[in-house]
Amino acid sequence: MIYLSVEKVRSFVYSMLLKADVREDVASSVTEGLIQASLRGVDSHGIRLLPHYLEGVKKGRINANPKYSFCKTNLSTGLLDADHTFGHAAGMEAVKRVVDLAKEAGTGHVAIYNSSHFGAAAYYALEIAKHDMIGMSFSNTDALVQTYGGKKPFLGNNPMAIAAPCKEEEPFCLDMATSMVTFNKVRQWREIGQEAPPGTGADLEGNETTNPHDMVMLSPFGGYKGFGLGFAIEMLCSLLTGMPYGPNIPKMFEAPMNQKRFLGHFLIAIKIDAFQPIDLFKKHLSQMMSDIRQEPRKNSQVPIQVAGDPEKKAFLERIQRGIPLSPKEYEMFKKLGTMDRIDIDEY
Amino acid sequence: MIYLSVEKVRSFVYSMLLKADVREDVASSVTEGLIQASLRGVDSHGIRLLPHYLEGVKKGRINANPKYSFCKTNLSTGLLDADHTFGHAAGMEAVKRVVDLAKEAGTGHVAIYNSSHFGAAAYYALEIAKHDMIGMSFSNTDALVQTYGGKKPFLGNNPMAIAAPCKEEEPFCLDMATSMVTFNKVRQWREIGQEAPPGTGADLEGNETTNPHDMVMLSPFGGYKGFGLGFAIEMLCSLLTGMPYGPNIPKMFEAPMNQKRFLGHFLIAIKIDAFQPIDLFKKHLSQMMSDIRQEPRKNSQVPIQVAGDPEKKAFLERIQRGIPLSPKEYEMFKKLGTMDRIDIDEY
């Protein structure tokens, strides 16, 4: 692994986006979203997506210079037309709106439409949590999860994140897809020639397989319950936003790169002191997390973790040591910068 | 099985509650909640709980004549002190409040504290959905789910429900606990001498077991993801309501029946036409459900179901044929009524 300093990677990503004529505020939201994901160890949604996004800008899928249109529809609700820009930028624009709504009404709810790939859902929930609110973020995605009892995928692996501020600790943050694993994990198994664990996905016929090369769809997490949760998220992100659902959503990698995605997201912000004194809530949340971590362990060598603990650990390591890239990824970034005479090592 | 007409059971349950000096409005909410659960096939939360509740009233756990206190804390938020009454009554009182908030602000959020057993979470979400809103309901419960990576239970099997209105069909309704199965299922396996499926629960030492007699805690559904979701629900229902969490919550069956439960619930109502025209939303939701049901089946004999489909099917059957009771349950109800000279067969 090659470790690159956060500053170096941040400058590289931001410069590459600007060179592609992405507007500064948009480039900034995308950069911070990718860096945050990479720092938190969520590599599937980190900087490795940059080439894909740049191609999307170049070919017309992603609008680099969006004209947002926000419509406040009630005291606590609104809709944001993201004008087909990056999901990260759309999401961050919506975070501002949802936080403003919650400041005024106690809670805020924003449906985002005409968007593109959301990145890591945690990005938005964590940003809302900075305002002493519980943040929730949801996104639809293209069809990828095998229908429970079916042979084919219909719903996406619709992710959700819930974050809340703590005392003397980074916020609690649950960020999960509603599939057992992400498809990026399948790609990783293919690359390193590893068998997939049972129950993670199925082949073209819808039969469970542990051969990652045969795996073309993912299993919902927790069987019919996870599948039901994925459906509910699709309802928020497709039906409340007016966007397409299920197999009608253009696919991230397979659709032509000039094809807009028409993705929908949904954000919720809950002002904590509309319910409990904020200091008390933070104290209790930290206490509850600490209590769980101290429960008797199944295996004395394996610590009990609360949602978000692995990401907090990765963050602390990577903020020190840098963001790891495989030699292959490193070469890809070097090459990516060449045309624009941007060298990742020069920052 | 003995099948009793819905009218008969409804009158019996209501009369028994009134005889126990439960106030009429409270008795009515409890009766409808139990009947709905029994009709929807959710027997674990149906009329079989009546004896337990009556004992709770008699011994002082449940307040039969509560003085509710509602505090609207912001345009879309409020807290309801349920004064230790039935969860059903507290929940239905909160539904009125949350719907009113949503009518005024686009969405409503109510935290309920000093409550007791919630019954089926679907009851409240479905009631909210009647107002052309998306309804969500959550509850904490006493410690029962094995901590992921741990030996003991900390979180409850914290249930959640999400309901939304459709066109020409009963509302979509996902109602699920965050455990693989409910403990009532374990009791059922014990009674009929059936082995439990692998991965459903563990013994006193925290080791997975398929012997229902050894099973004292439940596995979270979907591993660490379901466990994380359970944690997030505990955050809403314990920390936002100011109620105890995890092992600090008095247990439903093991705690003395004069011990109040101090349970917390959380309701969300989202006015659909704050986002999309209601008719369009309903049409799209029905279409999406229909599309999924028509996907190619894994097994041609087993229909693909959307969340809530099994409950809809049970409802249609039971509204015709009546609510089924085992001979043992039937005798229990007969006996229960004897002291108060209420005969379930006389209605």
Image (cartoon, coloured by chain):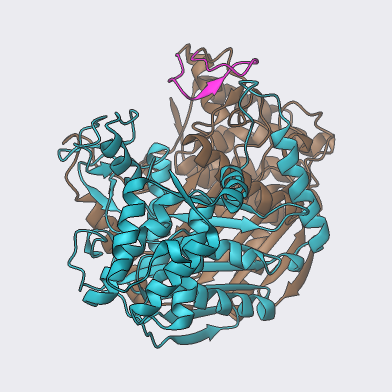
Chain colours: A cyan, B brown
Can you say whether A85 is above or below A42 in the image?
below
Residue depicted at 55% across the width and 83% down the height:
A74
Can you say whether B170 is above or below B327 in the image?
below
Left or right: A145 in relation to B343: left
Q: Nearer the viewer, residue B279 or B276?
A: B276
Query: Looking at the rendering, in which quadrant would you find the C terminus of chain B?
Result: top right
Residue depicted at 60% across the width and 42% down the height:
B158
Left or right: A166 in relation to B313: right
Q: Is residue A299 visible?
A: yes
| Magenta stretch contains residue B117 | no
Residue at the farthest front position: A346
Q: Nearer the viewer, residue A30 or B200?
A: A30
Q: Nearer the viewer, residue A261 or A330?
A: A330
Secondary structure mostly taken by the magenta-highlighted segment of the chain: loop
Can you say whether B88 is above or below A294 in the image?
below
Can you say whether A231 is above or below B75 in the image?
above
Residue B231: quarter of image: top right
Instruction: Give the x, y percent position of residue B80.
Output: 75, 61
Left or right: A306 in relation to A213: right
Instruction: Give the x, y percent position of residue B336.
Output: 67, 28
Residue depicted at 54% across the width and 64% down the height:
A7
Instruction: Give the x, y percent position of residue B45.
Output: 56, 38
Instruction: Give the x, y percent position of residue A100.
Output: 63, 80
Query: Looking at the rendering, in which quadrant would you find the N terminus of chain B?
Result: top left
Q: Nearer the viewer, residue B160 or B9?
A: B160
Q: Is residue B129 visible?
A: no
Q: Which residues are magenta?
A: B195-210
Q: How many marks?
A: 0
| Magenta stretch contains residue B206 | yes
